[in-house]
Image (cartoon, coloured by chain):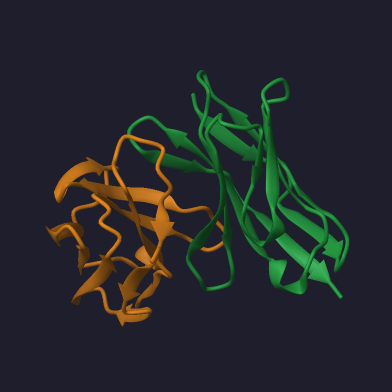
Chain colours: A orange, B green
Amino acid sequence: DTEVTQTPKHLVMGMTNKKSLKCEQHMGHRAMYWYKQKAKKPPELMFVYSYEKLSINESVPSRFSPECPNSSLLNLHLHALQPEDSALYLCASSQQQGTDDEQYFGPGTRLTVT
Amino acid sequence: AQSVTQLDSHVSVSEGTPVLLRCNYSSSYSPSLFWYVQHPNKGLQLLLKYTSAATLVKGINGFEAEFKKSETSFHLTKPSAHMSDAAEYFCALFKYGNKLVFGAGTILRVKS
């Protein structure tokens, strides 16, 4: 099973709201990623977790707060977002960080900030 | 610097004709290269991966890609396009630190 699941599929939130995106994989992967994809653009890396520890933060604003509660779950907590944060948020996982293992992507959460 | 360039933003083919999506790379070492496909409002699906074991890589759904070091290219091909192939395709390069660097994408249109 090479499935990465993400919830919710769609999310609309106001600029003062707090919400969370969730990602889950059961492939035993030890690296998990958050990407942001704006319309008509390629995905851009936001965060990497390796063995449940934050490994890479691509200078993402603090209104995005990642969390990895266990090896199968990855959350992205959102607070005080701006309309320009509206995008498709993709989660991915791979066997390990630091190798060229394939990354498997979830279907994404379409976020709209009003 | 490691990067990939997709040479066409849009490609249009007729159903049953060959598909060619072009990708050039820049890397100071032997690269690991990937092709992903993204259907509308979906996540990315891995088509194939090159890691120097063989220059011709076969992927899913009849796609294959050939690594040409002399041309720094990794073009994606399929002998016969199907309507379901209409999607956006991303070439990607693995960068040190487990960071995937994506090209800008190529939208493939398949005409009936």
Side of B59 relative to A35 (left or right): right
| Residue B27: % across, % down | 54, 24
What x and y, as percent, mark residue B105? 62, 52
Q: Residue at x 70, y 66 (%)?
A: B85
Left or right of B102 in this view: B5: right
Q: Is residue B83 left or right of residue A83?
A: right
Vertical relation: A106 (above or below) B104: below
Q: Nearer the viewer, residue B3 or B93?
A: B93
Identified at 33% across, 81% down, the residue is A12
Q: Farthest residue toward the left?
A: A69
For the image shown, how many numbered marks are present on the structure?
A: 0
**Relative to the observer, which residue lies in front, A11 or A102?**
A102
Q: Quadrant of residue B55?
A: top right
Q: Position of residue B2 (x, y in %)?
A: 50, 28
Q: Quadrant of the C terminus of chain B?
A: bottom right
Residue at the (76%, 73%) spot, across then down = B83
Q: Nearer the viewer, residue B88 or B66?
A: B66
Residue B46, image x and y in percent? 52, 55
Which of the two residues, B58 or B111, is positioned nearer the viewer here?
Answer: B58
Q: Is residue A47 above or below residue A2?
A: above
Q: From this view, report whether residue B24 is shown above or below residue A65.
A: above
Residue located 80% across and 68% down the image: B110
**Corner quadrant of residue B49:** top right
